[in-house]
Image (cartoon, rainbow, N blue to C red):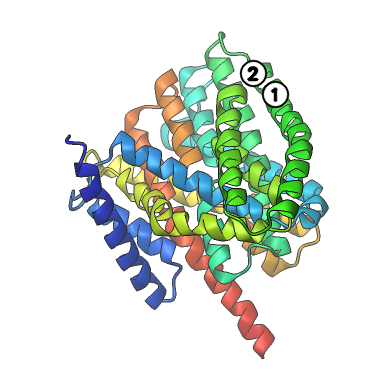
Amino acid sequence: MEAYNVFKDLAIIIIFAKLFGILARKCKAPQVVGEIIAGLLIGPSVLGLVQQSDFLVQMAEVGVVLLMFSAGLETDLKELMKTGLVAFLIACAGVFIPLIGGTLLYMGFYGAAPWGSDKFYTAVFIGVIMTATSVSITVQSLKEMGKLKGKVGTTILSAAIIDDVIGIIVLTFVIGFKNPDSNPGSVVVSTLLFFLMAFAAGIIVFRIFKKLDERYPHTQRIPILSLALCFFFAYAAEHFFGIADITGAYVAGVILCSIQDSSYIDQKMEISSYMMFGPIFFASIGFKTSIDHLNGSILLFSAAFVIVALVTKIIGCGLMARFCKFSIPDSVKIGVGMMTRGEVALIVAQKGLSVGLLTSEYFTAVILLIIASSVFTPIILKLLYSKDTAANAA
């Protein structure tokens, strides 16, 4: 592939993503829905105008990192502290219920399996894939509606970060049972070390940025240094601790969310994210869909997989939110907001392929889950919030 061909791909992605984003907004749906559909249309599965490449994969990763950094910047830290225990409980329910649901689904299709058999590990791993939560699409949808900073939005973000950590621990334990060379305990230690490092470094970094902000308010050097901090935390989370890079980016945003110019930093980040990196990330979700090897059996399993994965998240997170004294409408919003899957589910599935816990034929189900959750979540959230607006107007 010639190096300059990437410019053609970028032009196609940006034009189609923005065009379909506008069409989605005209249809009263969040524009991220249009961008995902655009990726599916121009990707290998339909028109084939753009082929997935390492460059686009990396650009999409930058896009989701910037999106989560922006979410961290918009976090109300006081509200986050208030929802910490509640978010933890919601995250635990959001992992446990889908894990059980996915395991039972596989056994329902292919029969019960004895403890310790390969079939049993595959069944459990199907459940593990369902535990992953990716709130980047929920974040964008809530931002468009101006609801990200509220109690529901903050709870979803907090629970998703905790959910990611728990999901990684569960994944490592399952791989540990399958592969004796893996040490599940090391993941727990690494996770604790990351958050201890983030807390200690965060105090120092916050003080440095606060002084810089006081001395050079509203200058471009603040967003530039903030971007460097975002990328470093994303790198450090993955490289040194084995935590998802989006978690590191979100933590970096939380560190800076209380400085005076946090909204100014977010405004500068939004320019790059909105114009290029965001559309590439959301379109890339559509690129990953392949329909070449589908048959009736896999389609049926995939449909059931999608339904169980979505419903178990809503039930687990929604019921726990209700138990934690959220109203019924807000509990439903939290459950729906937590049901999106994205890059984390893909990472988990790819890990399963590499260690022999999953075969390639089931990868289609994961892709369909990501597409379905990415499309339905923002639409349902918009409907739920529109009902609130109508009720308040009445």
Q: Is residue 354 left or right of residue 4?
A: right
- 240 or 51, which is in the foreground? 240
- 272 or 394, which is in the foreground? 272
Give neighbour class at mark 2: few <14, some 14-19, many 20+ (Cα, 10 Å): some
Where disc 2 sits, the SS reads helix
Q: Which residue is identified by label 1?
A: 188
View extreme (bottom): residue = 394
Q: Rounded to the nearest whole Å, what is the CA distance between mark 1 and mark 2? A: 7 Å
Q: Which mark is residue 40?
A: none
Rendering coords of residue 340 (x, y %): 52, 51
Contact, mark 1 vs mark 2 (Cβ under 8 Å): yes
View extreme (front): residue = 215
Q: What residue sits 21% from the left and 41% below the top? A: 292
Q: What residue sits 76% from the left and 63% below the top? A: 326
Inspect the image, locate mark 2, and give the three-letter code of the amino acid beneath it: Pro
Q: Which mark is residue 184?
A: 2
Q: Is residue 117 left or right of residue 277?
A: right
Residue 312 appearing in the image: no
